[in-house]
Image (tube, rainbow, N blue to C red):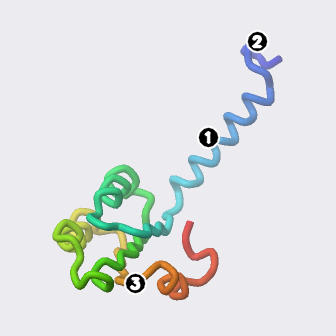
Amino acid sequence: MSRLGFLPKSLLIAGLCYIMLLEQLEKRKVKILEIGVWRGDFAKEILVRYHHIIAEYVMIEPAEKITGSMTPELKQRLQEFPVQFPGINFRHFNELSVEASSLFPDEYFD
């Protein structure tokens, strides 16, 4: 039993490890990949919540390649995101995911 009397030591150790892991993640910036961005709704949610730990946000959306145009929402967000989140490098690829995967080395993304 721990000093707290009601928590087993293993649970306390696991909790401390989790806290230490979160602290380490907060200290480094990550590279994010989103496949199938469509309108950019999910990207916006992720950016609002985690912009402080994101170094690069890569978006794969082939709508323009397939249909000839991307959604107006995504077109607008691709212009707005760099202004709203200036510390993040944004990249958009108008490719199918299989083709886009060859553009990045293994283990590039977090």
Does residue 88 sit above or below 6 in this rendering?
below
The residue under label 1 is 19
Tag 2, which secondary structure?
A: loop
- Give, as a three-letter code, the residue at label 2: Gly
- The residue nearer to you, when weighing 50 against 76, is 76
Tag 1, which secondary structure?
A: helix
Residue shown at 35%/67% (left/top)? Answer: 37
Q: CA distance from mark 2 to mark 3?
A: 57 Å
Q: Residue furthest front?
A: 67
Residue shown at 83%/17% (left/top)? Answer: 1
The tag earlier along the polypeptide, 3 or 1, is: 1
The residue under label 2 is 5
The residue under label 3 is 95
In the image, 3: left or right of 97?
right
- Give, as a three-letter code, the residue at label 1: Ile
The tag earlier along the polypeptide, 2 or 1, is: 2
